[in-house]
Image: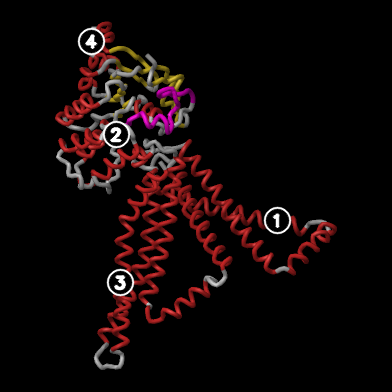
Amino acid sequence: MMNKLLKYECLAVWRILVPIWAGTAVFSLLTALVTRLNGTFANMAGTPVISVLESFFQLATALLIFATMAACVILNIQRFYKLLGEQGYLMFSLPAAPWQHMAAKLLCACGSTIASLLVSIGCVWMANSDGEEEAAQTFSDAFSLSNTMGTVFLVLLLVLSLVSAYLYLYLCMAIGSRWPQQRMLASIATYFVLGFIIQMVSIFLFVAGAIVMANLPRSVLDGMAPFFIEISRNQTAVTWGLAGFVLLLFAAADAILWAVTQYLISKKLNLP
Amino acid sequence: MQAIYQAKGLTKRYGHKTALDNLSFEVLPGRLVGLLGPNGSGKTTLLKLSAGLLRPSAGQVFIGGREPGVATKTITSYLPDRMALPVEMRVDDLVNLFADFYEDFDMVKASRMLADLKLDPRQRIGTMSKGTQEKMELCLVMSRAAKLYLLDEPLGGVDPAAREYILNTILRNYNEDAAVVISTHLVEDVERMLDEVLILKEGQLLAHRAVDELREESGMSLDEYFRHVFRV
């Protein structure tokens, strides 16, 4: 069932995104073409038209790349919102468990967002074809592509944070759907209120943690000192320890968001 | 014969409001059952609970001996009281979706019914009239050889000619070994086809009787009985 749900979800999303990707790629190619033409005729008199065209295409490509990412996110939000609306009567009547609907939507949302990101990077590359090597070097430096473990960490972090972002939106929509009316408004309000609550709880926990640490007995602090001195000598271990902790934190947040959303759509489903 | 549908002490509350109050009844295979009651009597809630779209506050529903879930959805064909088809999809996409998800979906029957409606397979659902969308939804639901059909207000908001089409579609296409539960308050239209009725009033089961028996005992047609019971 999961494969079938994923197939229909991907078809529905890609049917809209592929033409947008294609349009953005075409504009990027045109930008590259006009940029080269401008470079070729740079020393000739009477070429401001090409310069204007170049500026126009660069602006249009930049806007299209932004639109590609925005369209992808909005589309994926809308797909989940519709599942909790009238389309839910059809979808939840299919012989598939609620978690499978959620998983199909999440996988498709993350996949299409990563694909949109790659298309956008490719388009930026194409549009700036003059500086291919420079761009490649910048990209490589920025994302530490020479460092395999660093790349793995960044990719994992990207995927986990993407999952968190979508799951948080799904949770807000699932809570918003509990309202009998004005569900969209309720979902948006939930997004901000829940975000505020999470921030406040985080601050409280940090402050509480700091107070506890500051008031620890001298003997306990002395006992912990050798441990911190020891790990401070091994910078690599500290780096990977922190990286692992960040990934675990995201994974834990994802698990909580998933569990609460799944509970809401399977036990407390409230179709309009 | 074992009941295909059983409700045991079924109760559903929304906050302080009780939508269904301790309902217990059984439906046998091969029966056409009318779920009757005025607006707000709990018909849609009962069908949503049976289709697995809601959870009961108390009591249980069994379909083919199981509580609503993935297994019961494979044998239950549910028509909601609203248009639930994705408007961006095309006719053939939806037919393929039903064929993919339901093993009992009869592609030939569906194609025949959709051809009767003169629908272009490449037509998008969103471009159809509301009436055609509803008919298409019914055709898909009735193209399954399900063991239980749950039809929520299939006659709601349609003109008399469309009502006749819908009733004929149901009568010609349902699996004869299956039970059909039709909710409606247009009693006169469905009276001729029903074997038995479940009458709900303010969430309680007022009557569960064979239609012929009810007519004989009351000396009234089902429609007259309904009007008599729910007279304001």
Identify the residue at image location x=42%, y=54%: A109
The x, y position of residue B162, in whole percent, is: 17, 31
Residue B58 image point, x, y percent:
49, 25
Residue at which label 2 appears: B105
Marks 2 and 4: which is nearer the front? 2
**Amino acid type, label 3:** Phe
Q: In the rendered view of the protein, which quadrant contains the C terminus of chain B?
A: top left
User: How far is the residue under mark 1 from the one under mark 2?
Assistant: 60 Å
Q: Which mark is residue B220?
A: 4
Which segment did they paint magenta? B58-78
Query: What residue is pinned by disc 1?
Result: A209
Name the foreground residue: B90 vs A180: B90
Disc nearest the viewer among 1 and 2: 2
Please tell me which residue lies in front, B19 or A241: A241
Q: Are marks 3 and 1 in contact (CB under 8 Å)?
A: no
Give how far apart the Cα atoms at labels 1 and 4 are. 77 Å
Give the residue number, with chain letter if any, for mark 3. Answer: A27
Q: Is residue B86 above or below residue A43?
A: above
Distance Cα–Cα, label 3 vs label 1: 52 Å
Identify the element where label 4 is drawn.
Answer: loop
The mark lying in front, picked from 4 and 3, is 3
Between A197 and B97, the one lying in front of the other is B97
Q: Is residue A186 magenta?
A: no
Q: Residue at x 41, y 65 (%)?
A: A118
Chain bearing tag 2 is B
